[in-house]
Image (spheres, grey):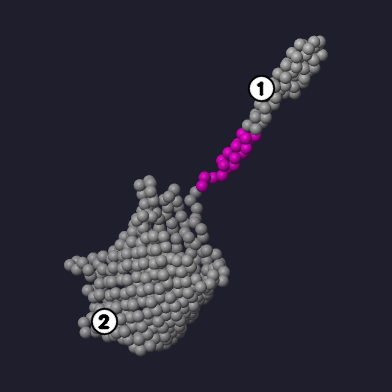
Amino acid sequence: MPLTKSSIIAAALGVAAVGAQAQTAEQLKDALAQAQAAAARAQAAAQQAQAALEQALAAAEQAKRNQQVAATPPAAPVPAASGSGLTIASGPNSATLYGLIDITYVSQSNADKASHSVFGPRVAWFSGNRWGLTGQRLLGGQGDLKGIFRLESEFESQTGNMDTPGVLFNRDAWVGLESASLGKLTFGRQNALARDPAASAVYGDPYGSPRASTEEGGYTNNNDFKQLIFYAGSATGTRVNNGVVWKKDFGGLVAGAQYQFGGVPGSFSQGTTETGSLAYNGNGYTVAGFATRADIGGLKHTSYSAGGNVAVLPIVRLYGGYFHYTADQAAGLGSRTDTAWTMSTKIAPSKVYDFELGYQTMRAKNAGLTGSGYVQNAFSDTTGIKAVATGNRNTLYASAFYHVDAAMEFYVAADRLKTTGTYLAAQANGARSQNEVGLGMRYKF
C-alpha cells in the first residue's frame, strides 16, 4: 500500500490519542501494541513506495534506451579497414572486393638495342595492378569447414589493358575447402606453391610478409631484380593452370604440396608439376624451402631452394636464400644448371617509413637462349633451343617507402643489372648493364 503524508499523520495522531486515554497499565500495554502495529504498517508502506520509485526509474531508463535504438538505422554491410577491401558479410559467410593500383614513372638506360634511355610510366615496379573477388561460406551449419574462392585479374595502370590479353582472371581462378583440421585445399589457376609465403616468399626479397602462412603472395617479376621468382615456377610459369594445392599451418610449422595436371592426351606426365614445401616460424625468425619437378614438352626441369629471415634488431630484418635449378634441353645441347643466391634487408624505424637494400646473383651454366639470343627464364620450354650461354646475372637494388596510411603509399626505387660471360638479359636489350630509377605511388582498396 503506498505511503502518503495523510496516512503518516493519522498514524501519529492515533498513537497520541491512545496514549492520552490510557489510565491503567493494561491500557498502556494495549496502546503500545497498537502503536507498534501502526509503526510496522508505516514501515511496510515506506518500503513499497521505495520499490515503486525504483521500478519507475528503471522503466524510464529502459524507455530512453529503446528510443535511442529506434533512432539508430539498422546495421548494414560496411567496408573493411582501409586497404583491405569492401566486405559484405552475413554471419560467417562473406565476399570481398579488393584491388591495387600502382603507377610507376621510371628512368631506364639501355631501353632498346640502340642503347637509348627512356623516362615515363610503365608496368608497376613492385606489384601487378589488380582487382579481385574472394569469399568464404560455412558449410553444413556447424564445425569450421568452409567453401572458399578467389577470382583475380591483372591490368596495366598506364594503359588499362589486360596484363594477359584475352584472359580475364589471369592471376587467380580457384575454388576450395578450408578448415583447421583439413588445412587449405584449392583447385584451379593459382600461384605456384614454391613462390608463396609457405615457401620462398619469406626470403626472396624484403617486401612481403616475413612469416610463413597458407595465404597466396610472393614476389613479382617486373624489374631487373625480380627474376629469382622463375626458379619457384612450374610448367606454366609462376602460376599453375589445372592446379591442386594443399597447405596447412600446424602451429608454427607450415607444410604444402602441389600437383599440376598436364592435360596432354596420350601423355599423362607431360605438362605436370609436383612441388613440396616446408616452413617454420620461430621466435623472431622464419626458415623455409621447397622442391619442384616439372615435365615441359617431355623434358625434365627441377629446382630446390632454402632460406629464411631473422630480426636482428627491432627495426632491422635480414633475408637470404639459395636456389638450384636444372633442366634437360634439346638434343645435343646438354643440360642446364643454375645456382643463385640472394641477400637483402629491411629497416623500418617507424610505421610511416621503411627502407630496403638487396643483392642477388644468378649463375647460369649452359643455359638455353631465346630466339633473340637472351637467356631463357627457368621453367621455360627448352625443346626448341638452338644455342646456349654461360654467365652471371647480378643485381643490386634499393628502395624507400612513405606510408600515408593503410591504403596509400609513395616510394622511390632503383636497381643496377650487370651480366658476365655470354649471359645476356632480355631486360637490358643485349647490353651488359642497365640502370633503373622509379618513383611511384600505390593505392590499395
Percent position of residue 254, x then y: 38, 63
First reached walking from the N terminus: tag 2 or tag 1: 1
- In the depicted view, which residue is nearer to us: 118 or 268? 268
Q: Is 296 one of the magenta-colored residues?
A: no
Q: For numbered disc 1, what is the local secondary structure? A: loop
Q: Is residue 361 above or below residue 220?
A: below
Tell me the quarter of the picture where residue 127 sits.
bottom left
The amino acid pointed to by label 1 is Met
The label number, if any, that marks residue 335 in the structure image? 2
Q: Over which residues does the magenta segment extend?
A: 56-75
Disc 1 crowd, CA 10 A, few/some/many (<14, 14-19, 20+): few
Residue found at x 66% / y 26%: 48
SS under mark 2 = loop
**Residue 367 lies in what quarter of the image?**
bottom left
Foreground residue among 281 and 127 = 281
User: Which of the pair 11/6 is nearer the observer?
Assistant: 11
Q: Kindly report the distance in space between the C-alpha atoms of the residues bearing marks 2 and 1.
A: 104 Å
Question: Residue 21 placed where, x, y %?
Answer: 80, 11
User: Which residue is painted at 48% across and 74% down in the image?
Assistant: 318
Q: Which residue is mark 1?
A: 1
Question: Who is closer to the viewer here, 160 or 372?
Answer: 372
- Judge whether 6 appears above or below 100 on screen: above
Magenta highlight on residue 60: yes
